Image: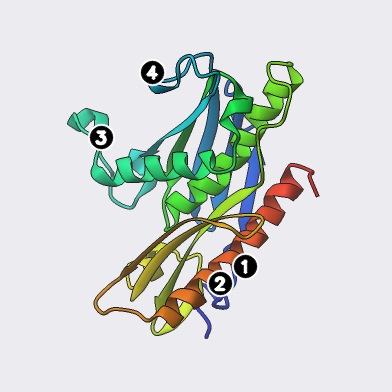
Amino acid sequence: MKRLDGRTPNQLRPVKITRHYLKYPAGSVLIEMGNTKVICTATVQGRVPEHKRGTGSGWVTAEYAMLPGSTAERSPREQAQGKTRGRTHEIQRLIGRALRAVIDLDKLGERTIIIDADVIQADGGTRTASITGSFVALYDAVAKLRKEREIDDDPIREFLAAVSVGVVDGVAVVDLPYEEDSAAEVDMNIVATESGNLVEVQGTAEGKPFSKKTLNDLIEMGEKAVEQLVSIQKRILRKE
C-alpha cells in the first residue's frame, strides 16, 4: 500500500530536531515530523509543588498549547476564552507522565522542570511529536544542571519517544498526518522507552471494534517506530 504522501505503511514522516532553538530556556528544540512542528522548552525552577516539599525529590510537569495559526482555521487562544479545554489538560498530563517515567526525581533534588510544548503547525501527531521533542529538551536541561554542578548524578534512566499508529482503509500505518488521522478506523498513540517498555497506549475504535491481533500489530509497529525515533534523538544528542 502506498499512502497519500507516498510512504509505506511502516515509514515515518521526515523527522528533524533542532536543539537550542531558543535563547533562554535550559533546553529547547524545534521538532518537525512532516508538516507538524512543535517548539518544546524545558525551564528549571528552584521549587517544587506542595506535595513534594520537604521530600528532597523533584518534579517534572508540562503545559501544551496550539498557537492560533497552527491550523487551517485560526484556533482561538484558550486563555482568551477563560478556560482550558479537556483535550489540552489530557495532553499536558500525558506529556508529564511520560517524562516522569524515565527520570529519577530523587536525583533531581527539590526543583521543578517545566516543559512547554507549543504547536506552531499541526498536521497530525502533535501530542506524540511533543513527547519526542520534549524529551530532548529535558535531556538538555538536565545536562545543563550537571554541567553547572547543581546535581551530581544523571537522573535520566533511559530515552523515550512517542508515535501515532492507526488503521486506514484496513491497513495498519504509522505516524498519521491529519488527512489519515481524520479518516482512520483505529487511532492509537504509543509512548515507549528505548528498552521497549510501554509507558502509555491510547487506542480508540472509530466506528467498529478492533481485534486483539490488530492491537498487537499496532503496538509492534509503534515500538519499531519508537526505536527509530530514539536513534534520531541519540544522533542529535551525539549519544550513539
Q: Earlier in the sequence, mark 1 or mark 4?
A: 4
In the image, residue 152 sits, relative to residue 2, either above or below, namely above
In the image, residue 95 sits, relative to residue 53, either above or below, namely below
Please name the residue that numbered disc 3 is placed on: 78
Give yes or no for contact between labels 2 and 1 (Cβ–Cβ under 8 Å). yes
Please name the residue that numbered disc 4 is placed on: 50
Instruction: Name the amino acid type tagged 4.
Output: Glu
Instruction: Name the amino acid type tagged 1.
Output: Lys
Q: Position of residue 46 (x, y in %)?
A: 53, 13
Q: Residues within 10 Å of mark 1 (few under 14, many from 20)?
A: some
Of 213 and 74, which appears nearest the observer? 213
Instruction: Name the amino acid type tagged 3.
Output: Glu
Q: Earlier in the sequence, mark 3 or mark 4?
A: 4
Instruction: Name the amino acid type tagged 2.
Output: Glu
Q: Residues within 10 Å of mark 4 (few under 14, many from 20)?
A: few
Q: Position of residue 195 (x, y in %)?
A: 66, 57
Please name the residue that numbered disc 2 is placed on: 220
Q: CA distance from mark 2 to mark 3?
A: 36 Å
Q: CA distance from mark 2 to mark 1?
A: 6 Å
Q: Quadrant of residue 236?
A: top right
Q: Is residue 191 something that shows in the picture? A: yes
Q: Nearer the viewer, mark 2 or mark 3?
A: 2
Give yes or no for contact between labels 1 and 4 (Cβ–Cβ under 8 Å). no
What is the basis of the colouring in this image? rainbow
Q: Earlier in the sequence, mark 4 or mark 2?
A: 4
Give yes or no for contact between labels 3 and 4 (Cβ–Cβ under 8 Å). no
Q: Residues within 10 Å of mark 2 (few under 14, many from 20)?
A: some
Q: Earlier in the sequence, mark 1 or mark 3?
A: 3
Q: Which mark is residue 224?
A: 1
